[in-house]
Amino acid sequence: MTTQHHADRASWRRRNPAEFLAEVDVAVVGFGIVGIGHAVAALDAGKTVAIIDRDRRPIGASIRNFGHACVTGQVGELADLAYTARRRWLELADRVGFWAAETGGLALARSARERNILEELADDRGERVRMLSADEASRTLGTDGPPDLKAGALLRDDLRVDPREAVPKIAAWLADQPGTTVWPNTSFVGSEDDVVYTSRGPLRAEKTYLCTGHDLDYVAPELAEECAILRCALQMTLVEDPGVRIEPAVLSGTSMLRYEAFSQTEAARGLREELTERSPDLLDIDANLMMTQRPDGTLIIGDSHEVRSTQEPFLEESTTGTLLAHAERLLGLGPGGLRPRQRWQGVYATSRDRAYLQRDLSDHLSACVVTTGVGMTIGLGLAERSMR
Ligand SMILES: Cc1cc2nc3c(=O)[nH]c(=O)nc-3n(C[C@H](O)[C@H](O)[C@H](O)COP(=O)(O)OP(=O)(O)OC[C@H]3O[C@@H](n4cnc5c(N)ncnc54)[C@H](O)[C@@H]3O)c2cc1C
């Protein structure tokens, strides 16, 4: 397949091969978690690798998220990918030297239905999901928790990294590995056979992986349309250390709507209606109310969801207000108990008909894009599978 045309292509094709930026076994486009995962997997398979990214450093979805590998929340094939990714995260944390903690996740139930969902999951998953009483849940949380707390469940296999540390550190580590070249500030503009056209000139790669995340439509618009890939924008807030230590990632009732391990339980029937009744403002912004604490004590709080082909760049203050007010309640803090330090928008690829796209477009070109909000959970698993 030939991707987007570029004005200079004809002149590049006439160039002497010595003028290629690089000649490698594998080229990877994008240094988010998906691209970086592909680069590491290729390197481990003994291949030479070139990584290009249009930015100077990772600033995409992979550093804007919770850093939560939501392993327990996945079912079927995604669960297999998540367990592979979990192993790869831990290996990489050792090799590269970044924080990755087997903290698990903590799901909080605030109604009988939510408690039933967790119990059903615990029955199904055995020792991987442990039910907690309301007291045990609030002790694990390190705060009183919400006044209506009914129970909790500890999701043993969930893993956490600091998103602002992990991917940039892997990218820097990759740049130092023999056999790897990294081309920051370099855009992929198209490819033909084994020649990859970039904004700095052509390179030659036996295989190229497009790991561009939600911007796939910029380089392969027809593929993005065929796979119904759109952009999902999320509003996030970093708040000052509230003076408590919360080890696990904290999930709420809205998380139970989103992750299939919860939403596919019998007990989850009627959950949406219940939450619409209890917290209509959260449903209005399609929230997944959750939080993770970074090693410095700051809390990442999110998130809202809005799906469009092109996103508004403007953050709605009311959305942040809704998320913060509910986060304060979840922690049992009064109004104003959380002090915002930063707000940002994150965008990921989403599709109504698939959780990821992993496809050979020609003998020399493949695309790999996670099309739901679980790239930190399954991205490294997909990368390992690409190299098989
Ligand atoms: C707010 C938020 C919270 C989330 N929370 C979680 C979570 O807790 N757990 C979880 O599992 N997942 C979570 N996700 C989803 C996860 O972050 C994404 O699925 C994942 O990071 C996508 O990784 P990526 O490598 O595909 O994309 P990105 O990290 O966006 O990387 C894509 C890279 O491609 C580069 N690129 C694009 N086009 C070109 C081009 N033409 N030429 C060169 N380079 C190009 C970009 O510059 C970018 O660096 C969250 C996402 C967001 C936004």
Image (cartoon, rainbow, N blue to C red):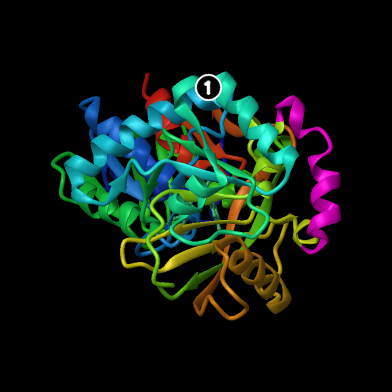
Disc 1 target residue: 125
Query: Measured from the top left, where is residue 338 in percent x and y?
Result: 53, 75
Residue placed most toward the observer, 63 or 364: 63
Q: Is residue 170 visible?
A: yes
Q: Tell me the quarter of the picture where residue 162 sits.
A: bottom left
Q: Is residue 98 left or right of residue 136?
A: left
Residue at screen point 19% across, 46% down: 96
Q: Determine whether 74 is above or below 315 in the image.
A: above
Question: Is residue 266 shown in magenta?
Answer: yes
Secondary structure under badge 1? Answer: helix
Q: Tell me the quarter of the picture where residue 353 sits.
A: top right
Say which quadrant the N terminus sits in: top right
Residue placed most toward the observer, 194 or 383: 383
Q: Main secondary structure of the magenta part?
A: helix
Q: How many marks?
A: 1
Query: Measured from the top left, where is residue 345 in percent x and y?
Result: 58, 67
Q: Determine whether 281 is above or below 90 in the image.
A: below
Range shown magenta: 264-281
Residue placed most toward the observer, 191 or 378: 378
Residue at screen point 66% across, 71% down: 325
Question: Is residue 267 shown in magenta?
Answer: yes
Query: Measured from the top left, where is residue 229 in percent x and y?
Result: 69, 43
Q: What amino acid is labelled 1 in the image? A: Arg
